[in-house]
Image (spheres, coloured by chain):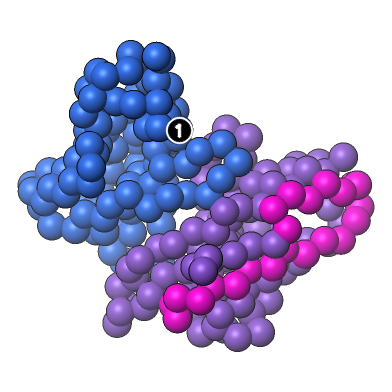
Amino acid sequence: DTAVSQTPKYLVTQMGNDKSIKCEQNLGHDTMYWYKQDSKKFLKIMFSYNNKELIINETVPNRFSPKSPDKAHLNLHINSLELGDSAVYFCASSQDMGGEYYGYTFGSGTRLTVV
Amino acid sequence: SQELEQSPQSLIVQEGKNLTINCTSSKTLYGLYWYKQKYGEGLIFLMMLQKGGEEKSHEKITAKLDEKKQQSSLHITASQPSHAGIYLCGADDGQGAQKLVFGQGTRLTINP
């Protein structure tokens, strides 16, 4: 059973399109994240949600909109895709233990290529 | 904000040799995580360190956190081709920021 699963694994799309990436975790964690890994392998946080509430938005263009229908799911919708959006997007989750966070678990990533 | 610096950025070693990767923080580390990433795959959790002086081992990989909690090292003994990949250290800044900040990664190549 995959702890944090993302779909799709690969996504190739044209500039200007709108696309979504889905993420689900079965660990019972309270907090979920989206991270972006660029071509230089820098891994940076984009968003975090705690129990469906947006906690962190790290200066990400508003073309990116996360949605959390419940605490086990965090989807990422991207409007008007640009070439610079090409990257690997990782979903992750962690457990909130009274303000400290443990057990960061990552999905296998979605490789987005915008052409 | 917390910044992590990994060294070296790239490492090529002969199979069977030992190696060390370092992760240095600009601030005190809370919850230092080591992950491994293979091409096209996600991040595989290796170890988490929290206490100053803490050391953990898993198979041939040992990770340490110094007493001041500002530096961690990852040591691989008798390296094997399966150890090849990108090693990332990540840290929670302990400010309730609810996020991990990562180093830039160390790309490890093992030559047979």
Q: Secondary structure at mark 1?
A: strand
In this view of the protein, can residue B81 be seen by the observer?
Answer: yes
The picture places residue B37, in percent across and down from the top left corner, at 47, 41
- Residue A28 magenta-highlighted: yes
In this picture, which residue range is highlighted in magenta?
A: A8-29
Name the residue at 53% across, 49% down.
B42
Residue B100: quarter of image: bottom left
Query: Which residue is denoted by mark 1 in the rendering?
Result: B85
The picture places residue B110, in percent across and down from the top left corner, at 39, 20
Disc 1: CA contacts within 10 A as few (<14), some (14-19) or many (>=20): some
Name the residue at 21% across, 29% down.
B77
Give the chain coloured purple. A
- Residue B79 magenta-highlighted: no
The hue of chain B in the figure is blue
Relative height, residue B56 to residue A5 (above, below)? above
Compare residues A58 and B43 and report the one nearer the observer. B43
Compare residues B41 and A80 and report the one nearer the observer. B41
Q: Is residue A24 left or right of residue A86?
A: left
Question: Identity of the amino acid at label 1?
Answer: Gly
The picture places residue A77, in percent across and down from the top left corner, at 76, 66
Name the residue at 32% across, 18% down.
B15
